[in-house]
Image: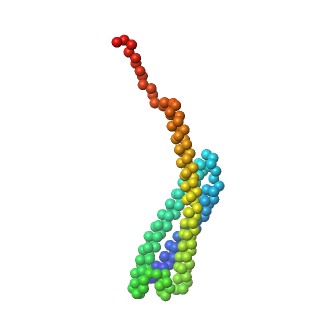
Amino acid sequence: MLEEYVQNLIALYQKDLEDYQELLQKMQAYHNFLNSTGDTEEDRDIFQQKLEQFAAYRGQIFENLQQRAKQAKELEAEISAQLAQLGTSLEIRTLETHLPATLYSELLNLAELLRQQMAAVLALDEKIIPLLNQELNVIKAELHRLQGSKKTKNVYEQTGQREARFIDKIK
């Protein structure tokens, strides 16, 4: 029974690893795109489109990861209950004596690969976020420039309708 729970946990970890690898590839492609964009109007349109696609994709991946994390927590609770009956606690080292060597080594390898992939995603995040902030600051500066020129135009041109004035000459 314990082996079955661990095999299910390994299957979840493998799906997580695949998602992290795919996310890392998409993040690298998006990072390369951010480094290659210019300041033309066409580039800004493409930038917005790519940003929306990337954000939607990333959101979906993280939603999948969160759902699997809930499933993993349930499996870990079952494994912990099984280990409690055997008089031990849930730690990866304590599983070694209760699992076949191949299953235990697969679990260890997957846990390490997941840790490495998560670290790589975080490292790439640290590169992407400043580029997005820089682009946001450029857009804000452009917006302030446009608002300033609109205010200047409105000072010299009244945009509202003028009131009708009647001057009564007869008193």
Location of residue 41 with respect to 55 vertically, above or below: above
Give the residue displayed 56% in from the left and 78% down from the top: 109
Give the residue displayed 61% in from the left and 45% down from the top: 41
Location of residue 101 with respect to 30 vertically, above or below: below
Give the residue displayed 53% in from the left and 57% down from the top: 55
Front-most of 163 and 145? 145
Query: How many marks do you count on the picture?
Result: 0
Residue 10 locus on image (x, y percent): 51, 76
Question: Taking 1 as reference, is 140 left or right?
Answer: right
Task: Looking at this view, name the residue that lies furthest to the left.
Answer: 171
Residue 147 locus on image (x, y percent): 52, 41
Q: Is residue 171 visible?
A: yes
Task: Looking at this view, name the residue that lies furthest to the top.
Answer: 170
Residue 161 locus on image (x, y percent): 45, 28
Front-most of 1 and 153? 153
Give the residue displayed 55% in from the left and 47% down from the top: 141
Residue 144 locus on image (x, y percent): 53, 44
